[in-house]
């Protein structure tokens, strides 16, 4: 059974403190599937950062976020 690409990245980042994009590509089999694997891994990492599942430490370096959801902004007005 093939593991989801996001899940592969999250599992690897949960085992290390920080990882570069190259280390993520080397330790997952995502690059083997795509012609331009670095581009696709970069897109997946960007989506994970926007979802709050991982943290971008600086350009090209990521770490696992222990908090799975973004905190709720209490100053946000309600719709109803």
Image (tube, rainbow, N blue to C red):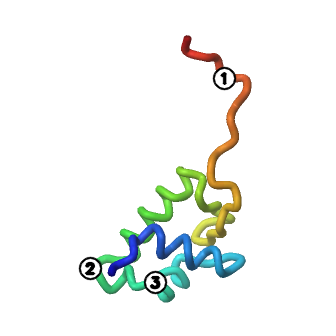
Mark 2 vs 1, N-terminal side: 2
What crowding class fits label 2: few (fewer than 14 Cα within 10 Å), some (14-19), or many (20 or more)? few
Inter-mark Cα distance, 2 to 3: 15 Å
Nearer to the camera, 73 or 59: 73
Mark 2 vs 3, N-terminal side: 3
The answer to whether marks 2 and 3 mark residues whose Cβ atoms lie closer than 8 Å is: no
Residue found 26% across the figure and 79% down from its top: 35
Element type where label 1 sits in the image: loop
Going by the image, does 80 lie left or right of 28? Answer: right
Q: Is residue 23 above or below residue 8?
A: below
- Location of mark 2 (residue): 35
Going by the image, does 71 lie left or right of 24? Answer: right
Element type where label 3 sits in the image: loop
Inter-mark Cα distance, 3 to 1: 39 Å
Nearer to the camera, 70 or 59: 70
Element type where label 2 sits in the image: loop
Residue found 67% across the figure and 61% down from its top: 65
- Location of mark 1 (residue): 76
Residue 61 lies, in percent from the top left, at 62, 71
Find residue 78 and report its image quarter.
top right
Mark 3 vs 1, N-terminal side: 3
Report the number of numbered marks: 3
Label for residue 28?
3
Q: Is residue 46 above or below residue 60?
A: above
Inter-mark Cα distance, 2 to 1: 43 Å
What crowding class fits label 1: few (fewer than 14 Cα within 10 Å), some (14-19), or many (20 or more)? few
Q: The C terminus appears in which quarter of the rendering?
A: top right
Residue 48 lies, in percent from the top left, at 52, 58
Find residue 13 and report its image quarter.
bottom right
Residue found 46% across the figure and 82% down from its top: 25
Q: The N terminus appears in which quarter of the rendering?
A: bottom left
């Amino acid at each position: 059974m093939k593991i989801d690409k996001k899940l592969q990245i999250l599992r690897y980042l949960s085992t290390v403190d920080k990882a570069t994009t190259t280390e993520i590509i080397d330790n997952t089999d995502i690059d083997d599937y795509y012609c331009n694997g670095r581009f696709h891994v970069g897109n997946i990492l960007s989506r994970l950062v926007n979802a709050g599942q991982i943290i971008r430490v600086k350009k090209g370096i990521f770490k696992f976020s222990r908090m799975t959801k973004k905190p709720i902004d209490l100053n946000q007005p309600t719709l109803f």
